Image: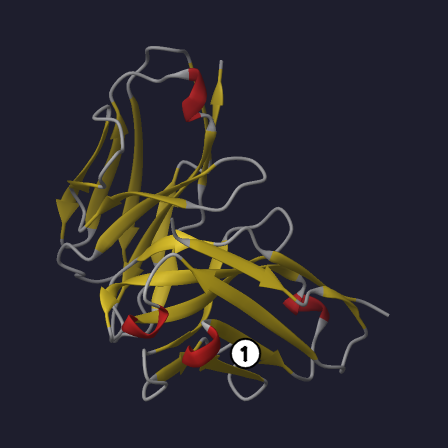
Amino acid sequence: EVQLVESGGGLVQPGRSLRLSCAASGFTFDDYAMHWVRQAPGKGLEWVSGISWNSGSIGYADSVKGRFTISRDNAKNSLYLQMNSLRAEDTALYYCAKDRRLLWFGELFDYWGQGTLVTVSS
Amino acid sequence: DIQMTQSPSSLSASVGDRVTITCQASQDISNYLNWYQQKPGKAPKLLIYDASNLETGVPSRFSGSGSGTDFTFTISSLQPEDIATYYCQQYDNLPRYTFGQGTKLEIK
């Protein structure tokens, strides 16, 4: 059974940093691209960032480019999101999501974690 | 960037009703359109991929159609457990993904 478990969320002041983690199990982690998708309270879904199987291809939404860094450790079956210079508008539930396509970026997200909440406020 | 316009934003229907949600892309996206269901307090779940393909294990009352710029998601006979928010999602110039604004479905 595929499981994605996010952690690392919390309350942080504007301008500070936070690192999210996603522990994956139930599939061959290093065979798939992975993503972060967020959802502001009461709002819709927004793709944040994605990383290919070997970290060779990475993408970011314009809203986080230059502030967030995605990474993965295939030996630990883990995905990360380093979030710097946080803003109030980054407040959201952050989901880790598995890509369906082998190795490179595909067209959809077939498994999602339950999310970790990030609140940016003074 | 391709924009997705999903409508309606909310919908109230009775059990057994046929429910339709639309998603319009700002430019031709072929069949690169997926539909997700998100129940309250839960993560999204994939229902339909490539505009019209039913994900394994998803009930056949769910269906999708369309290509180009106009897409439709249909529940043929609404069930109480279908109460959720539904999102369309497109992809272009991978990795770049856009979701529609969502449609909140309620029982009348």
Q: Residue A26, can we see it?
A: yes
Give the side of residue A56 with respect to residue A81, left or right.
left
> What subunit carries mark 1?
A
Across the whole image, how many numbered discs are drawn on residues?
A: 1
- Compared to residue B60, the image places residue A121 above or below, namely below
Secondary element at image label 1: loop
Colouring: secondary structure
- The residue located at (25%, 62%) in the rendering is A107
- Compared to residue B37, the image places residue A100 above or below, namely below
Q: What x and y, as percent, mark residue A39?
A: 56, 56
Q: What x and y, as percent, mark residue A27?
A: 34, 60
> B83 or A112: nearer the eye?
A112
- The residue located at (81%, 74%) in the rendering is A13
> A72 or B93: nearer the eye?
A72
Name the image quarter holding residue A66: bottom right
- Compared to residue B4, the image places residue B54 above or below, namely above
- Compared to residue B45, the image places residue A16 above or below, namely below
Q: Residue A73, can we see it?
A: no
Question: Which image quarter is the C terminus of chain A in?
Answer: bottom right
- The residue located at (62%, 46%) in the rendering is A42
- The residue located at (13%, 58%) in the rendering is B30
Q: What x and y, as percent, mark residue B62?
A: 25, 29
Q: What x and y, as percent, mark residue B33?
A: 23, 53
Name the image quarter holding residue A57: bottom left
Give the side of residue A42 with respect to residue A110, left or right.
right
> A58 or B97: nearer the eye?
A58
Residue type for callout 1:
Val
Badge 1 crowding class, 10 Å Cα cut-off, few under 14, some 14 to 19, many 20 or more, is some
Residue at which label 1 appears: A64
